[in-house]
Amino acid sequence: MKVTVRKASEADIVIICKALLESSRAEKRVGLFDFVFQASSDAQLLDYLKRLATAPTKCYCHYSNFFIALAGTVNVGAICAYEPRIATHDAFAKALEEIGIDESYHERIAGYLLCEPEVDNQTWVLDFLMLEEEFKSIENYKELVTKSMLPARLKGYRKVQTMVEIGSVETELIYKKLGFTLVDEKRSDYYEEQFSRAGLMRLQMIL
């Protein structure tokens, strides 16, 4: 079944938090947000993500940056699309502070910070791509990704970037089938120790 795509609203918070959690874990036991929040359960972690996605400070995880894939009227997927000049690291830190997470989280995600790809302010960024299993087709991924890039074109962006964990073969293949190419990658033994993957790769498309 084909999906349609629209901008997210706060009412879509459940699928947004699912996308944040599943995409960050990338089929592993733990992901970035497990280390940020140190939650005792997935339920608690999802609660933290809900608070982060609706925090007063709009970081890149804010619901307003998401697009939603629908099958009929049912939410079946999501993707985050944002401007790094607005959704900065400082905004992320401030949003975390607003929900009770102090800056000590930096130490807990040190492996990630070592491998985080560079991004300039002239680049549109995609992240947290997720579709429910029965809707995983290249056509549906294309619809979701393409619609999420429309604001980039309207705002004059000429480059779109995403990052994928080295070893996340399915996600890498999806983006490459959609026209993204590898720019570079960063590897770290510390990242592998934390996340059971070698590091992160940066993929880019020229609009």
Image: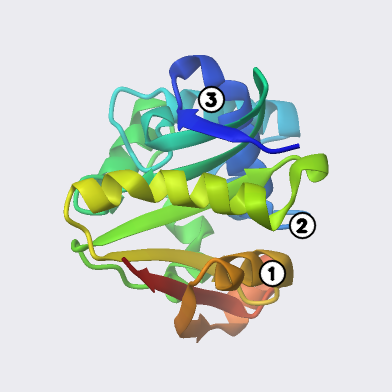
Distance CA(mark 2)–CA(mark 3) = 21 Å
The reply to whether dot 1 and dot 2 touch (C-beta < 8 Å) is yes
**Mark closest to the chain's N terminus, 1 or 2:** 2
**Looking at the picture, does residue 70 appear above or below residue 138?**
above
| Left or right placement of residue 87 versus residue 184 in this view | left
Query: Could you say whether the residue bearing mark 2 is in a helix, strand or loop?
Result: loop
Q: Which residue is mark 2?
A: 27
Q: CA distance from mark 3 to mark 1?
A: 25 Å
Q: Is residue 21 above or below residue 31?
A: above
Determine which residue is flagged by label 1: 168
Type of the residue with mark 3 = Lys
Amino acid on which disc 2 is placed: Glu
Find out whether the residues at labels 2 and 3 contact each other: C-beta distance under 8 Å. no
User: Looking at the picture, how far across and down is residue 141, in whole percent?
Assistant: 61, 51
Q: Assign the C terminus to one quadrant of the image.
A: bottom left
Q: Nearer the viewer, residue 105 or 72?
A: 72
Image location (x, y in percent) of residue 167? 70, 76
